Image (spheres, rainbow, N blue to C red):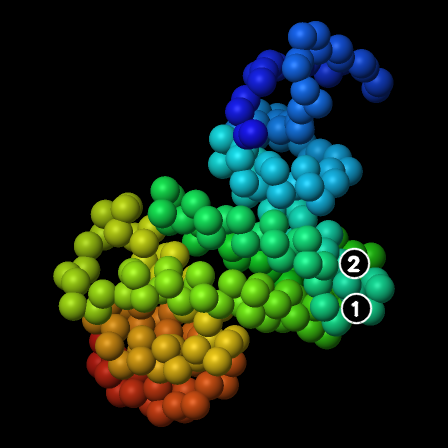
Amino acid sequence: DGKELLTQTLVLTRNEQTFTFKDIPQRPVLSLNRSFTAPVSIDIDYTDEERLHLMTYDTDDFNRYELGQNYALKEILNMVREKRTQPNEAFIRAFGSYLNQSDADPAFAARAVLLPAASFIGDQTDVFDVDAVLDARRQVRKAFADAFKDQLKDIYTGLADFEKPFSPDPKEAGKRALKNAALTYLALTDEAHLVQEAYQKSTNMTDLMAALSALVTHALPGFEEALQDFYHRYEDDHL
């Protein structure tokens, strides 16, 4: 049910060690290296159900984030190796779990739903097939956007208050980050018109750049006009 059963520091001093935990009422799902307590990479073969469980319930945000990133990395590399054009539904469902708790921590959700960069994915391969990695990553983003379109739109429209004065405080910054993360995914759906609207109505550079980036990246209608507008608007701004 997501409750913590036991938290304990394990000191590894040999190549192989066995640890036994007593009086545990049910089989637990391990959340290892919490808060990045040791600078190591851990390879553990979680099941899809265990990943979904931790991505939903783990109280350690570092582990929740890392688990999703590693899951995405594994899925994209598998798609490249198996020449698949569609991601595993279990992965998409697990990745979408971050949206369910976005109200509690918008900044975390905004970061968590972003996929690993293509350059990082390529670094994990012996031979970096750039086109294959970019295509697989694009297909994952599209599948995620389609699967959670309604939820992404609800998040975006709930946060898109263009008349609200800009505030740099962390809470508002987190909300902007989540709003713009949702917008970048909506750009891949039939709600892409929201991107042009966002560019036209944005009153701060953060939102303006997010909308412009989505317009240009996906070559959406009006992207060339937006580039020209942005240039003329700021051509005399030395910053």
Is 215 rendered above or below residue 163?
below
Q: Residue at x 50, y 85 (%)?
A: 219
When asked about the image quadrant of residue 167, the answer is: bottom left
Q: Residue furthest top?
A: 22
On screen, residue 140 versus residue 150, left or right, reads: right
Q: Does residue 180 appear anywhere in the picture?
A: no
Pointers 2 and 1 in contact (C-beta within 8 Å):
yes
Q: Residue at x 48, y 80 (%)?
A: 190
Query: Depth check: 42 or 138 in front?
Result: 138
Residue 162 located left or right of residue 11: left
Say which element carries label 2: helix
Mark nearer the N terminus (2 vs 1): 2
- The C terminus appears in which quarter of the rendering? bottom left
Q: Residues within 10 Å of mark 1 (few under 14, many from 20)?
A: few
Q: Please state which of residues 142 and 13 is positioned toward the viewer in this rendering.
A: 142
Helix, strand or loop at mark 1 = loop
- Residue 85 against residue 117 in the figure, above or below: below
* Residue 78 position (above or below residue 48): below
- x and y percentages locating residue 137 in the rendered image: 65, 66
Q: Is residue 219 visible?
A: yes
- Residue denoted by label 1: 84
Res. 78 mark = 2
Q: Is residue 236 left or right of residue 77?
A: left
Where is residue 123? Give x, y as percent. 71, 56
* Residue 37 percent location from the top left of the image: 57, 25
Residue drawn at (69%, 73%), measured in percent from left and top?
135
Amino acid bearing label 1? Arg
